[in-house]
């Protein structure tokens, strides 16, 4: 199911690129934007460039982010590259402003769906997540900075009008992503299970968050239970639930919104 949604999101993003942004030379954010830039400057197809630029970053993501996210990212990169190759670069409207607004909005919808179902669009998303874990910079700030460089490059190579349209497109894309994918919302998850150690071991290897464990007993059965508590972003909850259900289909999971986190929100990068 997740892979199908990721493929659908990739189709939406490719449609936004080839039918709204690319025909006017408007770039997108991330590696896809770089692929569009190179596609405009060279005879190579945008889809092929997008795939080739993402390959080394996918390898890096596998070692740094874990198997599940990397697999979903690979599905996204492969399907997005295929759709960019298949969908013809034909403008739906002759109005550049309309293309910028709708291209940014539709593209943001696609990326938001991809992120919501434990994937990334590859490229700069992977770099931003890795750098954010090793520093105090937020993912949003890192992506804004890196995408700003793409805008500057487009301004020097083409013209500043294109650069400003690109900036508008990236801004609208970000707003749409925030609407679909509320990654900034933090949740506290409590897991009551009889398979606490098995779940703990897999969570430690695949989730970049601290875990607190305690013992409890069922009020009715008096059966011994393990209680795991962790604070997550909404982005990580689907992955955690998959891990829990893999080991214990009868586990009880309670999630509630966290107002504030004071203290370490993640495990040490060397742990």
Image: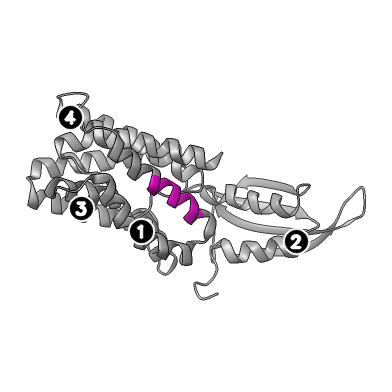
Q: Is residue 127 visible?
A: no
Which tag, 1 or 4, sits closer to the chain's start? Answer: 1
How far, Cα to Cα, is label 4 from label 2?
54 Å
Near mark 4 (Cα within 10 A), the count class, few <14, some 14-19 or many ≥20, is: some
How far apart, in angstroms, are the residues tagged by discs 1 and 4?
A: 33 Å
Circles 3, 2 touching at the beta carbon (< 8 Å): no
* Residue at numbered disc 4: 97
For marks 1 and 3 on the same chain, the one whose residue lies earlier in the sequence: 1
In the rendered picture of this protein, how many numbered marks are placed on residues?
A: 4
Image spot of residue 85 (x, y percent): 28, 40
Marks 4 and 2, the one that precedes in the sequence: 4
Identify the element where label 1 is drawn: helix
Mark 4 or 3, nearer chain start: 4
Nearest the camera: 140 or 68? 68
The reply to whether dot 1 and dot 3 touch (C-beta < 8 Å) is no
Q: Quadrant of residue 107?
A: top left
Tell me residue 212's x, y (percent): 68, 64
Q: Assess whether residue 126 is covered by the magenta stretch.
A: no
Relative vertical location of residue 143 with respect to residue 22 in this rendering, above or below:
below
Q: Position of residue 24 (x, y in %)?
A: 15, 35
């Amino acid at each position: 199911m997740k892979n199908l949604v990721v493929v659908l999101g990739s189709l939406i993003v490719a449609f936004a690129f080839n039918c709204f942004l690319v025909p006017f030379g408007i770039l997108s954010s991330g590696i896809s934007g770089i692929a569009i830039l190179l596609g405009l400057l060279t005879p190579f197809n945008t889809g092929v460039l997008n795939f080739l630029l993402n390959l080394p970053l996918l390898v890096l993501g596998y070692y740094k982010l874990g198997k599940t996210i990397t697999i979903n990212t690979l599905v996204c990169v492969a399907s997005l590259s295929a759709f960019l190759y298949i969908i013809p670069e034909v403008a739906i409207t002759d109005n550049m402003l309309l293309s910028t607004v709708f291209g940014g909005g539709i593209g943001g919808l696609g990326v938001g769906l991809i992120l919501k179902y434990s994937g990334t669009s590859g490229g700069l998303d992977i770099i931003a997540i890795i750098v954010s874990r090793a520093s105090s910079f937020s993912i949003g700030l890192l992506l804004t900075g890196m995408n700003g460089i793409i805008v500057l490059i487009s301004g020097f190579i083409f013209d500043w009008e294109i650069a400003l349209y690109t900036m508008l497109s990236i801004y609208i894309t970000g707003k749409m992503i925030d609407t679909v994918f509320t990654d900034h919302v933090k949740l506290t998850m409590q897991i009551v299970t009889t398979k606490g150690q098995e779940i703990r071991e897999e969570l430690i290897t695949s989730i970049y968050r601290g875990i607190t464990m305690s013992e409890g007993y069922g009020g009715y059965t008096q059966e011994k239970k393990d209680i795991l508590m962790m604070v997550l972003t909404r982005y990580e909850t689907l992955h955690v639930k998959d891990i829990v259900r893999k080991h214990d289909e009868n586990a009880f999971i309670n999630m509630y919104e966290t107002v504030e986190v004071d203290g370490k929100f993640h495990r040490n990068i060397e742990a």
